[in-house]
Amino acid sequence: MVAADDAGRTSDIAGKLGVEPGMVVQELGWDNDVDEAVRDAVEEKAGDDLLDEDADDVVDLVLLWWRDGDGDLVDALISAIGSLADNGVIWVFTPKTGRRGHVEPSEIAEAAPTAGLSQTSNISVSEDWVGSRLVAPKAAKPRR
């Protein structure tokens, strides 16, 4: 059972991630260690289930759960960009320092620009996970 304080904090996380009703959200890197409360909060705020990695819809937001040993982060980011809407956001969730699978912040800071993204902020999303917000720089986006 989730305590009232935890429930309030969890439901607020979707707002901190910028999730709005009607947004299309894709989740990549799911495994049994992800924070289900974060996933639930995002689904509740968006009003629909999270899309999995097989979806080919245009998405407003990508949740990328990433751990040390998951492969090449640049490749994962480039794949995530492929389905991202023009003003879309990628949140890279990594285990916090001292947790199994921890990723050094410098790895994200180096991978983001290589993939054509800018890191704009970091937040604690749960007891075990931290999130890094990545966006495509406005100047780098092609005009339509």
Image (cartoon, rainbow, N blue to C red):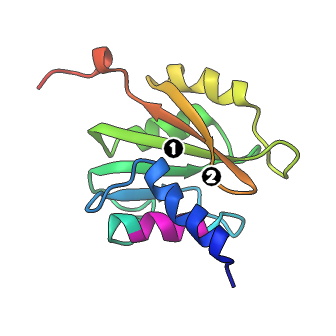
Q: Which amino acid does label 1 sit on?
A: Trp
Q: Count numbered badges in the picture.
A: 2
Query: Is label 2 in a helix, a strand or a loop?
Result: loop
Q: Does the magenta stretch include residue 62?
A: no
Residue at screen point 31% across, 17% down: 140
Q: Does the magenta stretch include residue 41?
A: yes
Q: Which mark is residue 125?
A: 2
Locate residue 24, reporting x and y percent.
Answer: 31, 58
Q: State which quadrant residue 106 falls in.
A: top right
Q: What residue type is labelled 2?
A: Val
Q: Mark 1 points at which residue?
A: 91
Locate residue 96, reporting x and y percent.
Answer: 77, 46
User: Sequence order check: which comes first, mark 2 or mark 1?
Assistant: 1
Quarter of the image for the N terminus: give it. bottom right
Q: State which quadrant residue 45 falls in.
A: bottom left
Query: Is label 1 in a helix, a strand or a loop?
Result: strand
| Identity of the residue furthest to the right in this view | 98
Residue at screen point 66% across, 69% down: 6
Q: Pointer 2: residues within 10 angstroms few (<14), some, or many (20+)? A: many
Q: In this view, does 77 lie above or below 59?
A: above
Asked if the residue under mark 1 is in contact with the one under mark 2, i.e. CB atoms within 8 Å, the reply is yes
Q: Give the range drawn in magenta.
A: 37-44
Q: Is residue 37 above or below residue 91?
A: below
